[in-house]
Image (tube, rainbow, N blue to C red):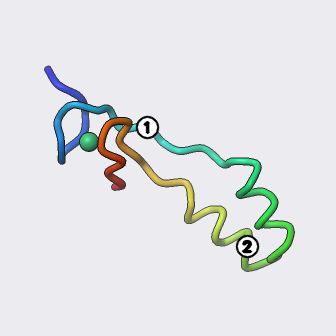
Amino acid sequence: MGGGCPKCHVGSIHTSHITFCGILWAILLFPIGLLCLLCCTTKRCTNCSYTD
Ligand SMILES: [Zn+2]
């Protein structure tokens, strides 16, 4: 049983949550920034930084 990563099979996939920086961009570039913020919530591998 490895990690859930389809690329390296070592790391595990974690859903990257909205960061402070993301919120800042959302405010500065409203309403486009808000869309970017939603798009930024991607799944990322903890080992190889693979994004889903
Ligand atoms: Zn990986």
* 24 with respect to 45 (left or right): right
Residue at image position (55%, 54%) is: 41
Q: Is residue 2 left or right of residue 44?
A: left
Residue at point 66%, 48% (across, down): 18
Q: Amino acid at mark 2?
A: Gly
Residue displayed at 66% across by 72% down: 35
- Local packing at callout 1 (Cα closer than 10 Å; few below 14, some 14-19, many 20+) is some
Quadrant containing ligand 1 reads: top left
Against 30, is 44 above or below?
A: above
Which residue is denoted by mark 1 in the rendering?
Answer: 14
Residue 33: which numbered mark, if any? Answer: 2
Check if mark 1's residue and mark 2's residue have beta carbons within 8 Å. no
Q: Against 9, is 20 above or below?
A: below
Picture coordinates of residue 34 (x, y %)?
Answer: 73, 68
Describe the element under mark 1 as helix, strand or loop.
Answer: strand
Amino acid carrying mark 1 in the image = His
